[in-house]
Amino acid sequence: MRVALVLLAGALLPHSTVRAQLAITEMMSSALTTNIDQTLSTNHSDFWELTNFGSNTVDLTRYRFTDSTHSPFALVPAGAPPLFIQPSESIVFVRSNITHTEAQFRTWWGSCVGPNVQIRFFKNPGFSHNGDGIRVYDSMTNLVDSVDFGPATFGVSFVYDTVTGEFGALSVLGQGGACRAATAADVGSPGVNTGPIPLRIVQQPTNLAVCLGLDATFNVLAVGMPRPRYQWFFNDAAIPGENDASLTIFGATLANAGSYRVVITNGLSIAQSASVLLSVSTNLAAVSFFTLPVNVTVVTNRTARFSVSVCAYPAARLQWFSNGVAVADATNQMLLIRNCALESSGAEICVRAANSLGTNTACAHLYVTTKPDLRFTEVQAYPYTACNAHHDWFEVTNFGTNAVDLLGYHFSDQPTLAGASVVTQPMVVQPGESVVFAKNPVASIFVDWWGADQLPPGLKIFPYGGFSLGRTGDALYLWDASAELFDELIDSISFAGVTNGASLQFDYDLFPFGAYSVPGEYGAFRATECGDIGSPGYTTNPPPRFVSISKEVDGAHLKWRAVEGRTYQLGYTEDPQSSDWKPLGITTATNSVPVITDPGANNGSNRFYHLLQLP
């Protein structure tokens, strides 16, 4: 999950100028620790830095800020003295959960922090080491600045790149004022930055030519510090609300043809892009499909959406059909079928597009299913990070009788569909199967962490970005691809604070969620790396299975997937048709993948083995 910081401001200059002059220039979300358990939980606080790159003093007293998930908090708490930021000054804001006083912060950083650096404290929010953001707003709730950052490197702060101004670079000892803290090995530069970066355009927008009715997108890339702000123009008139690095004209018409440019500012200087042209084709053209309708699967009583885009001149006339019957008033690029009934599953949905030069037709199918029985069955929000930077993950299990494709499903830790993460690849979950959603790492990293021999063969893993799970408690929500409202949930859970290194799951005897995983119970085992405890891919203890059999100098080494604490009997025979299995040994598993050696297996022998878990 990425983290963002946001500022709000009430100022002595016009708001637009003030907002452009202020910038978030540093943040530390994961300070080092010397805890005896080596868990790397912080023993110093989060901090972040705000810099005034302008030439005027700014009153910050009514500014507000937040992370990527919470509502804004006052930058200056009620009853605290007013706060002014001088030209070229950087102010450090420290979370008061561990570091409570200015003296403690200065002791932590020693000579790294100059005597004139202002240090202020805030109570909430905290920033996730797995990634987060900062947002700052003014007294009129205008966004002043925002940054997002990914997983933190313990003991190193985030700063801005000295070439582009992009936030998320790591502090490097001896560069840009970065030094080592006095009482820990943390590296940062609180109160110090590398100054402004000249505003410049590094990639200009280009001319576009599109068919009538299709979308057109212009892009520009600019760098600088303070960060660039954008305003797009059409035929020299500002386009209201178009303030991003890209501009999309949806369903371009002849009225959209013309000249476009973007003016970029950062409060210190102004840059203007080249003017580019949007041409909307009026060449005679028969109907051709730019995008085709695709098959749609929805849950009963939900709305199905089919869409198409067409290139044609004169403009195409559209008509949608269901099983060959024209749908009333369905003449637009999108077709909505509301309250889908189970008996309509399999319907052929077609669209006919026609102009004076010809007709073309494209079809897809509607599939309607009952609500799938998918459930969150495990969460790990606080893994051990002492040996590797592992991140949180959660598990979803199919308790139904039909396979479910999770493509297009939404999931979030917030009770809203807005901003929810989306499954972007096919992921078919069979009845009884569990799949894992892992924060940030690619699937191979997760497999190495938990051990390929210990995980279910072929475990499906979906790496995702976005939100992180809170150590002090959080929630998870799941919606299918057709959901439009929050209450169309497939499943949800909530949990309180968690313990480092242990996942939470259902207690299948009592059915509440939030029981800690215990090795040997409900499929739980110890991870290969770091020793975390969980049961990714399992909701019950799996049956024993051989993982590998290898012939070594001292005999055959037999490795099998076991349940920690259970007892196993191994046997062998030289004739697979025989029922005469000779005993090889009885052993109690002390881990999830025990190994036993058969010294009688040599280069001249041909042996077969069996494995039995004893009651």
Image: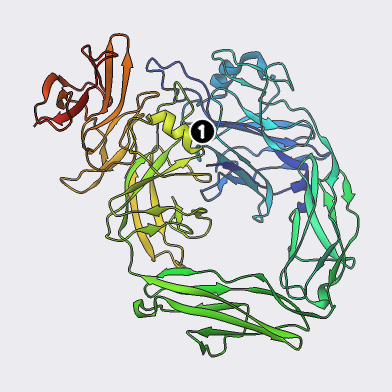
The residue sitting at 38% across, 14% down in the picture is 36
| Quarter of the rendering occupied by the C terminus | top left
Q: Nearer the viewer, residue 423 or 63?
A: 423
The residue sitting at 46% across, 59% down in the picture is 416
Q: Is residue 124 visible?
A: yes
Vertical order, 34 against 515 (above or below): above
Q: Quadrant of residue 585?
A: top left
Q: Quadrant of residue 163?
A: top right
Give the residue number, with chain letter if any, for mark 1: 129
Q: Give the image location of residue 411, x and y in percent.
A: 44, 54
Q: Give the image location of residue 304, x and y in percent.
A: 48, 73
Vertical order, 258 against 152 (above or below): below
Colour convention of the picture: rainbow
Q: Residue furthest top?
A: 554
Secondary structure type for disc 1: loop
Q: Nearer the viewer, residue 214 or 132?
A: 214
The residue sitting at 44% across, 52% down in the picture is 427
Q: Nearer the viewer, residue 235 or 554?
A: 554
Q: Give the residue type at disc 1.
A: His
Q: Give the image location of residue 7, x and y in percent.
A: 64, 45
Q: Is residue 62 visible?
A: no
* Mark 1, other Cα within 10 Å: few <14 / some 14–19 / many ≥20: many
The answer to whether residue 572 is left or right of residue 229 is left
Vertical order, 319 against 188 (above or below): below
Q: Give the image location of residue 543, x and y in percent.
A: 21, 37
How many callouts does the rendering have?
1
